[in-house]
Image: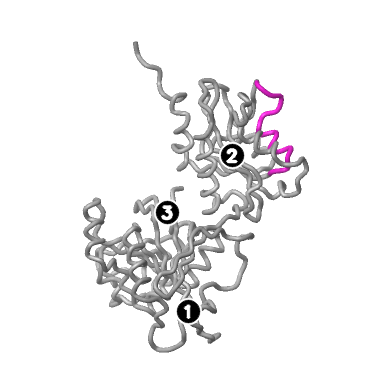
Amino acid sequence: MTQPYVLLSAAVSLDGYLDDTGPERLLLSGPEDFDRVDEVRAGSDAILVGAGTLRTDNPRLLVNSAERRAARVAAGLPEYPLKVTVSASGDLDPAAAFWHTGGEKAVCTTDEGARRLRGRLPADIEVVALGPEVEWRAVLAHLGERRGVRRLMVEGGGLVHTQLLRQGLADELQLALAPLFVGDTAAPRMFGPGAYPPGRMRLVETRQVGDVVLMRYVPTAPGTGPLATAADRRWLEEACALAAQCPPSRTAFSVGAVIVAADGTELARAHSREGGDPVVHAEEAALAKLAAGDPRLAGATVYSSLEPCARRASRPAPCSRLILDAGVRRVVTAWCEPDTFVAAADGNAVLAARGADVVLLPEYEALAQAPNAHLLAPPAHP
Protein backbone atom coordinates (compact mmCIF):
# COMPACT_ATOMS: atom_id res chain seq x y z
CA MET A 1 0.00 0.00 0.00
CA THR A 2 1.32 3.44 -0.97
CA GLN A 3 0.28 6.07 1.51
CA PRO A 4 1.18 9.74 1.82
CA TYR A 5 3.74 11.35 4.05
CA VAL A 6 1.49 12.55 6.90
CA LEU A 7 2.39 15.87 8.51
CA LEU A 8 0.41 16.98 11.58
CA SER A 9 0.33 20.76 12.00
CA ALA A 10 -1.07 22.76 14.91
CA ALA A 11 -0.52 25.79 17.10
CA VAL A 12 -0.86 25.21 20.85
CA SER A 13 -0.71 27.27 24.01
CA LEU A 14 2.03 26.74 26.57
CA ASP A 15 -0.35 24.52 28.54
CA GLY A 16 -1.26 22.40 25.50
CA TYR A 17 -4.60 23.82 24.32
CA LEU A 18 -5.74 24.39 20.74
CA ASP A 19 -8.34 27.00 21.62
CA ASP A 20 -10.28 28.49 24.51
CA THR A 21 -14.04 28.27 25.12
CA GLY A 22 -14.93 31.74 23.88
CA PRO A 23 -17.24 32.37 20.92
CA GLU A 24 -14.38 33.47 18.65
CA ARG A 25 -11.45 31.38 17.51
CA LEU A 26 -8.37 31.99 19.70
CA LEU A 27 -5.51 33.16 17.48
CA LEU A 28 -2.44 31.41 18.82
CA SER A 29 -0.11 32.31 15.95
CA GLY A 30 1.03 35.63 14.55
CA PRO A 31 1.49 36.86 10.97
CA GLU A 32 4.91 35.23 10.57
CA ASP A 33 3.61 31.79 11.54
CA PHE A 34 0.49 32.15 9.40
CA ASP A 35 2.82 32.76 6.47
CA ARG A 36 4.87 29.67 7.41
CA VAL A 37 1.69 27.58 7.45
CA ASP A 38 0.77 29.00 4.05
CA GLU A 39 4.16 27.83 2.75
CA VAL A 40 3.59 24.33 4.15
CA ARG A 41 0.17 24.20 2.53
CA ALA A 42 1.64 25.23 -0.81
CA GLY A 43 4.13 22.35 -0.56
CA SER A 44 1.42 19.77 0.14
CA ASP A 45 -0.67 17.68 -2.23
CA ALA A 46 -3.66 17.67 0.10
CA ILE A 47 -4.85 19.30 3.32
CA LEU A 48 -7.11 17.39 5.73
CA VAL A 49 -9.28 18.43 8.66
CA GLY A 50 -11.75 16.48 10.72
CA ALA A 51 -15.47 17.12 10.59
CA GLY A 52 -15.39 18.71 14.05
CA THR A 53 -12.93 21.35 12.91
CA LEU A 54 -14.99 21.97 9.78
CA ARG A 55 -18.12 22.54 11.90
CA THR A 56 -16.56 24.77 14.58
CA ASP A 57 -14.04 26.79 12.56
CA ASN A 58 -15.57 26.82 9.05
CA PRO A 59 -12.04 26.92 7.53
CA ARG A 60 -11.28 27.74 3.91
CA LEU A 61 -7.82 26.04 3.93
CA LEU A 62 -6.42 28.07 1.05
CA VAL A 63 -2.93 28.91 -0.14
CA ASN A 64 -3.17 32.67 0.32
CA SER A 65 0.04 33.71 -1.42
CA ALA A 66 -0.49 34.44 -5.11
CA GLU A 67 3.22 33.80 -5.73
CA ARG A 68 3.02 30.33 -4.16
CA ARG A 69 -0.08 29.46 -6.13
CA ALA A 70 1.66 30.58 -9.31
CA ALA A 71 4.68 28.43 -8.44
CA ARG A 72 2.39 25.41 -8.04
CA VAL A 73 0.86 26.00 -11.46
CA ALA A 74 4.30 26.49 -13.02
CA ALA A 75 5.31 23.11 -11.57
CA GLY A 76 2.33 21.43 -13.22
CA LEU A 77 0.26 21.22 -10.03
CA PRO A 78 -3.26 22.47 -9.35
CA GLU A 79 -3.42 26.02 -8.03
CA TYR A 80 -4.66 24.71 -4.66
CA PRO A 81 -4.01 21.41 -2.88
CA LEU A 82 -6.86 18.92 -2.62
CA LYS A 83 -9.00 19.61 0.48
CA VAL A 84 -10.21 16.58 2.43
CA THR A 85 -12.46 16.09 5.42
CA VAL A 86 -13.40 12.91 7.25
CA SER A 87 -16.84 12.30 8.74
CA ALA A 88 -18.30 9.00 9.86
CA SER A 89 -21.84 10.40 10.07
CA GLY A 90 -21.84 12.54 6.93
CA ASP A 91 -23.46 15.30 9.00
CA LEU A 92 -21.82 18.22 7.22
CA ASP A 93 -23.09 21.66 6.32
CA PRO A 94 -23.22 22.01 2.52
CA ALA A 95 -22.99 25.80 2.92
CA ALA A 96 -19.60 25.66 4.70
CA ALA A 97 -16.80 27.75 3.18
CA PHE A 98 -14.72 24.56 2.87
CA TRP A 99 -16.82 23.40 -0.10
CA HIS A 100 -17.01 26.70 -1.96
CA THR A 101 -13.40 27.94 -1.97
CA GLY A 102 -10.17 26.66 -3.46
CA GLY A 103 -9.80 23.72 -5.82
CA GLU A 104 -10.83 20.07 -5.58
CA LYS A 105 -12.48 18.68 -2.44
CA ALA A 106 -13.25 15.23 -1.08
CA VAL A 107 -14.98 13.75 1.94
CA CYS A 108 -14.18 10.29 3.28
CA THR A 109 -17.13 8.75 5.08
CA THR A 110 -19.05 5.56 5.79
CA ASP A 111 -21.56 3.96 3.46
CA GLU A 112 -24.35 5.47 5.56
CA GLY A 113 -22.63 8.86 5.56
CA ALA A 114 -22.35 8.74 1.78
CA ARG A 115 -26.09 8.09 1.49
CA ARG A 116 -26.76 11.08 3.74
CA LEU A 117 -24.52 13.34 1.65
CA ARG A 118 -25.80 12.23 -1.73
CA GLY A 119 -27.33 15.21 -3.51
CA ARG A 120 -26.52 17.65 -0.70
CA LEU A 121 -22.98 18.65 -1.73
CA PRO A 122 -21.88 20.27 -4.98
CA ALA A 123 -21.65 17.69 -7.75
CA ASP A 124 -17.89 18.09 -8.25
CA ILE A 125 -17.02 16.99 -4.70
CA GLU A 126 -15.79 13.41 -4.36
CA VAL A 127 -17.66 11.41 -1.72
CA VAL A 128 -15.64 8.33 -0.75
CA ALA A 129 -17.62 5.56 0.95
CA LEU A 130 -15.22 3.37 2.97
CA GLY A 131 -17.64 0.79 4.37
CA PRO A 132 -19.43 0.57 7.72
CA GLU A 133 -16.65 2.45 9.52
CA VAL A 134 -13.98 4.99 8.64
CA GLU A 135 -10.51 3.52 9.15
CA TRP A 136 -7.53 5.85 8.88
CA ARG A 137 -5.46 3.34 6.92
CA ALA A 138 -8.26 3.15 4.35
CA VAL A 139 -8.38 6.96 4.14
CA LEU A 140 -4.63 7.16 3.56
CA ALA A 141 -4.70 4.30 1.06
CA HIS A 142 -7.39 6.07 -0.97
CA LEU A 143 -5.50 9.35 -0.96
CA GLY A 144 -2.19 7.72 -1.85
CA GLU A 145 -3.28 5.13 -4.39
CA ARG A 146 -6.36 6.68 -5.96
CA ARG A 147 -5.62 10.40 -5.70
CA GLY A 148 -1.82 10.33 -5.97
CA VAL A 149 -1.30 12.29 -2.76
CA ARG A 150 2.33 12.07 -1.67
CA ARG A 151 2.33 14.71 1.06
CA LEU A 152 -0.70 15.21 3.30
CA MET A 153 -0.94 18.14 5.72
CA VAL A 154 -3.34 17.52 8.61
CA GLU A 155 -4.57 20.70 10.30
CA GLY A 156 -6.84 19.26 12.95
CA GLY A 157 -8.52 18.82 15.12
CA GLY A 158 -7.21 17.27 18.28
CA LEU A 159 -9.14 14.02 17.83
CA VAL A 160 -7.73 13.52 14.32
CA HIS A 161 -4.18 14.26 15.51
CA THR A 162 -4.62 11.88 18.45
CA GLN A 163 -5.92 9.02 16.31
CA LEU A 164 -3.18 9.31 13.69
CA LEU A 165 -0.43 9.46 16.31
CA ARG A 166 -1.83 6.57 18.36
CA GLN A 167 -2.05 4.39 15.25
CA GLY A 168 1.53 5.22 14.23
CA LEU A 169 0.45 6.88 10.99
CA ALA A 170 1.98 10.34 11.45
CA ASP A 171 5.34 10.91 9.77
CA GLU A 172 5.96 14.33 11.28
CA LEU A 173 4.54 16.61 13.96
CA GLN A 174 4.88 20.39 13.59
CA LEU A 175 3.91 22.34 16.72
CA ALA A 176 3.90 26.11 16.94
CA LEU A 177 4.15 26.88 20.66
CA ALA A 178 2.39 30.15 21.46
CA PRO A 179 3.47 32.33 24.42
CA LEU A 180 0.19 32.24 26.35
CA PHE A 181 -1.86 30.06 28.68
CA VAL A 182 -5.50 29.01 28.32
CA GLY A 183 -6.03 27.32 31.67
CA ASP A 184 -9.58 26.14 30.95
CA THR A 185 -10.06 22.40 31.32
CA ALA A 186 -13.17 22.60 29.13
CA ALA A 187 -11.12 23.91 26.20
CA PRO A 188 -9.92 21.52 23.44
CA ARG A 189 -6.50 20.03 23.95
CA MET A 190 -4.00 19.05 21.28
CA PHE A 191 -3.87 15.39 22.29
CA GLY A 192 -6.35 13.19 24.09
CA PRO A 193 -5.73 10.31 26.50
CA GLY A 194 -4.90 6.80 25.34
CA ALA A 195 -2.07 4.47 24.40
CA TYR A 196 0.54 6.10 22.18
CA PRO A 197 3.56 4.41 20.56
CA PRO A 198 6.33 3.90 23.14
CA GLY A 199 9.55 5.82 23.45
CA ARG A 200 10.62 9.34 22.67
CA MET A 201 10.05 11.20 19.44
CA ARG A 202 13.06 12.73 17.73
CA LEU A 203 13.36 16.52 17.60
CA VAL A 204 14.55 17.51 14.13
CA GLU A 205 14.14 21.30 14.23
CA THR A 206 13.39 24.23 16.53
CA ARG A 207 12.95 27.70 15.11
CA GLN A 208 11.59 31.03 16.30
CA VAL A 209 8.83 32.30 14.01
CA GLY A 210 7.68 35.69 15.20
CA ASP A 211 6.72 35.24 18.84
CA VAL A 212 6.07 31.49 18.58
CA VAL A 213 8.52 28.60 18.55
CA LEU A 214 8.20 25.96 15.84
CA MET A 215 9.11 22.45 16.95
CA ARG A 216 9.30 19.57 14.47
CA TYR A 217 9.29 15.98 15.70
CA VAL A 218 9.37 12.60 13.95
CA PRO A 219 8.36 9.26 15.52
CA THR A 220 10.98 6.60 16.20
CA ALA A 221 9.19 3.61 17.77
CA PRO A 222 8.68 0.66 15.38
CA GLY A 223 5.25 -0.77 14.78
CA THR A 224 4.05 -4.11 16.08
CA GLY A 225 2.80 -7.10 14.14
CA PRO A 226 2.29 -7.01 10.38
CA LEU A 227 1.13 -3.39 10.09
CA ALA A 228 3.66 -0.76 9.08
CA THR A 229 3.87 2.61 10.80
CA ALA A 230 5.40 5.91 9.80
CA ALA A 231 8.46 5.07 11.92
CA ASP A 232 8.82 1.75 10.06
CA ARG A 233 8.98 3.59 6.76
CA ARG A 234 11.57 6.02 8.08
CA TRP A 235 13.85 3.28 9.42
CA LEU A 236 13.54 1.31 6.19
CA GLU A 237 14.65 4.40 4.28
CA GLU A 238 17.68 4.50 6.57
CA ALA A 239 18.46 0.86 5.71
CA CYS A 240 18.14 1.57 1.99
CA ALA A 241 20.47 4.56 2.33
CA LEU A 242 23.04 2.33 4.06
CA ALA A 243 22.98 -0.03 1.08
CA ALA A 244 24.45 2.76 -1.03
CA GLN A 245 27.55 2.74 1.21
CA CYS A 246 28.48 -0.84 0.29
CA PRO A 247 31.66 -1.42 -1.69
CA PRO A 248 30.39 -2.48 -5.13
CA SER A 249 30.47 -6.14 -6.03
CA ARG A 250 29.68 -8.27 -9.07
CA THR A 251 28.92 -11.34 -6.95
CA ALA A 252 26.74 -10.04 -4.09
CA PHE A 253 23.98 -7.55 -3.44
CA SER A 254 24.48 -4.27 -1.63
CA VAL A 255 22.25 -4.30 1.44
CA GLY A 256 21.74 -2.07 4.46
CA ALA A 257 20.25 -3.05 7.83
CA VAL A 258 19.20 -1.25 11.01
CA ILE A 259 18.10 -2.84 14.29
CA VAL A 260 15.70 -0.75 16.38
CA ALA A 261 14.40 -1.45 19.89
CA ALA A 262 10.70 -1.32 20.76
CA ASP A 263 11.10 2.14 22.28
CA GLY A 264 12.63 3.55 19.09
CA THR A 265 16.26 3.37 20.21
CA GLU A 266 18.62 2.46 17.40
CA LEU A 267 20.64 -0.56 18.53
CA ALA A 268 22.92 -1.16 15.54
CA ARG A 269 23.32 -0.54 11.82
CA ALA A 270 25.52 -2.04 9.13
CA HIS A 271 25.88 -2.68 5.44
CA SER A 272 27.15 -5.54 3.32
CA ARG A 273 30.94 -5.99 3.11
CA GLU A 274 31.40 -3.62 6.04
CA GLY A 275 34.81 -3.38 7.66
CA GLY A 276 36.61 -4.92 4.73
CA ASP A 277 34.93 -8.34 5.12
CA PRO A 278 34.07 -9.26 1.50
CA VAL A 279 31.33 -11.75 2.44
CA VAL A 280 29.63 -10.30 5.53
CA HIS A 281 25.92 -9.56 5.13
CA ALA A 282 24.24 -6.43 6.47
CA GLU A 283 21.99 -8.16 9.02
CA GLU A 284 24.87 -10.37 10.16
CA ALA A 285 27.17 -7.38 10.67
CA ALA A 286 24.52 -5.42 12.59
CA LEU A 287 23.71 -8.32 14.92
CA ALA A 288 27.42 -8.85 15.58
CA LYS A 289 27.59 -5.37 17.13
CA LEU A 290 25.24 -6.44 19.94
CA ALA A 291 25.90 -8.80 22.81
CA ALA A 292 24.39 -12.26 22.51
CA GLY A 293 21.24 -12.42 24.60
CA ASP A 294 20.68 -8.66 24.65
CA PRO A 295 17.17 -8.50 26.14
CA ARG A 296 16.18 -5.63 23.85
CA LEU A 297 16.35 -7.91 20.82
CA ALA A 298 13.17 -9.76 21.80
CA GLY A 299 11.11 -6.65 21.09
CA ALA A 300 13.29 -5.23 18.33
CA THR A 301 12.66 -4.85 14.61
CA VAL A 302 15.26 -5.54 11.93
CA TYR A 303 15.01 -3.27 8.90
CA SER A 304 16.74 -4.62 5.81
CA SER A 305 16.73 -3.24 2.30
CA LEU A 306 16.70 -6.82 0.97
CA GLU A 307 14.91 -9.78 2.55
CA PRO A 308 17.29 -11.72 4.84
CA CYS A 309 18.91 -14.67 3.09
CA ALA A 310 17.60 -18.20 3.62
CA ARG A 311 20.69 -19.94 2.24
CA ARG A 312 24.27 -18.87 1.63
CA ALA A 313 27.55 -20.47 0.61
CA SER A 314 29.93 -18.02 2.30
CA ARG A 315 28.95 -18.69 5.95
CA PRO A 316 27.31 -21.58 7.85
CA ALA A 317 24.24 -19.63 9.01
CA PRO A 318 22.01 -17.52 6.76
CA CYS A 319 20.75 -14.19 8.06
CA SER A 320 17.19 -15.42 8.56
CA ARG A 321 18.49 -17.98 11.08
CA LEU A 322 20.78 -15.43 12.74
CA ILE A 323 17.82 -13.11 13.24
CA LEU A 324 15.66 -15.86 14.73
CA ASP A 325 18.46 -17.16 16.96
CA ALA A 326 18.97 -13.62 18.28
CA GLY A 327 15.35 -13.56 19.43
CA VAL A 328 14.09 -10.95 16.96
CA ARG A 329 10.54 -11.59 15.83
CA ARG A 330 9.81 -8.68 13.50
CA VAL A 331 11.46 -7.82 10.17
CA VAL A 332 10.64 -5.00 7.74
CA THR A 333 12.09 -5.20 4.25
CA ALA A 334 11.77 -3.46 0.90
CA TRP A 335 12.74 -6.02 -1.71
CA CYS A 336 12.35 -9.78 -2.14
CA GLU A 337 15.65 -11.35 -3.19
CA PRO A 338 15.71 -12.27 -6.89
CA ASP A 339 17.22 -15.55 -8.10
CA THR A 340 20.40 -13.82 -9.26
CA PHE A 341 22.70 -15.74 -6.90
CA VAL A 342 20.47 -18.19 -5.00
CA ALA A 343 17.43 -19.94 -6.49
CA ALA A 344 14.14 -19.67 -4.55
CA ALA A 345 15.79 -17.46 -1.93
CA ASP A 346 12.74 -17.00 0.28
CA GLY A 347 14.08 -15.72 3.59
CA ASN A 348 10.81 -13.99 4.41
CA ALA A 349 9.01 -17.36 4.31
CA VAL A 350 11.60 -18.88 6.66
CA LEU A 351 11.07 -16.06 9.14
CA ALA A 352 7.29 -16.24 8.93
CA ALA A 353 7.30 -20.03 9.37
CA ARG A 354 9.13 -19.56 12.69
CA GLY A 355 6.58 -17.05 13.98
CA ALA A 356 8.23 -13.77 13.00
CA ASP A 357 6.17 -10.89 11.67
CA VAL A 358 7.44 -9.95 8.22
CA VAL A 359 6.43 -6.61 6.71
CA LEU A 360 7.18 -6.00 3.03
CA LEU A 361 7.01 -2.39 1.81
CA PRO A 362 7.42 -2.67 -1.97
CA GLU A 363 7.13 1.10 -2.44
CA TYR A 364 10.78 1.20 -1.30
CA GLU A 365 11.90 -1.51 -3.73
CA ALA A 366 13.33 0.92 -6.26
CA LEU A 367 15.35 2.63 -3.51
CA ALA A 368 16.75 -0.74 -2.40
CA GLN A 369 17.53 -1.75 -5.97
CA ALA A 370 19.37 1.45 -6.89
CA PRO A 371 22.81 0.41 -5.51
CA ASN A 372 22.38 -2.94 -7.30
CA ALA A 373 21.49 -1.65 -10.75
CA HIS A 374 24.64 -3.20 -12.23
CA LEU A 375 23.45 -6.64 -11.12
CA LEU A 376 19.90 -6.24 -12.42
CA ALA A 377 20.54 -4.80 -15.88
CA PRO A 378 19.76 -7.23 -18.73
CA PRO A 379 22.80 -8.54 -20.60
CA ALA A 380 23.85 -6.46 -23.56
CA HIS A 381 23.10 -7.90 -26.99
CA PRO A 382 26.10 -8.41 -29.26
Instruction: Decide: is 334 above or below 93.
Output: above
Q: Distance between the residues labelled 3 and 1?
A: 32 Å
Q: Name the residue under label 1.
A: 179
The one nearer the camera, 36 or 159, is 36
**Mark linked to residue 4:** 3
Say above or below: 309 vs 128.
above
**Camera-side mark, 3 or 2:** 2
Q: Residue 191 occupies which quadrant of the picture?
A: bottom right
Q: Distance between the residues labelled 3 and 2?
A: 24 Å
Q: Which label number is shown at residue 257?
A: 2
Question: Residue at left 46%, top 33%?
Answer: 369
- In screen coordinates, is 177 left or right of 355? left
Q: In which quarter of the image is the C terminus?
A: top left
Residue 225 x/y as whole percent: 62, 50
Q: Where is residue 275 in the image (x, y as percent from the top left)?
A: 62, 30
Comparing 209 with 56, the one in front is 209
Residue name at image x 44 percent, y 28 percent = 373
Q: In the image, what residue type sits under mark 3?
A: Pro
Percent x, y of residue 124 = 25, 63
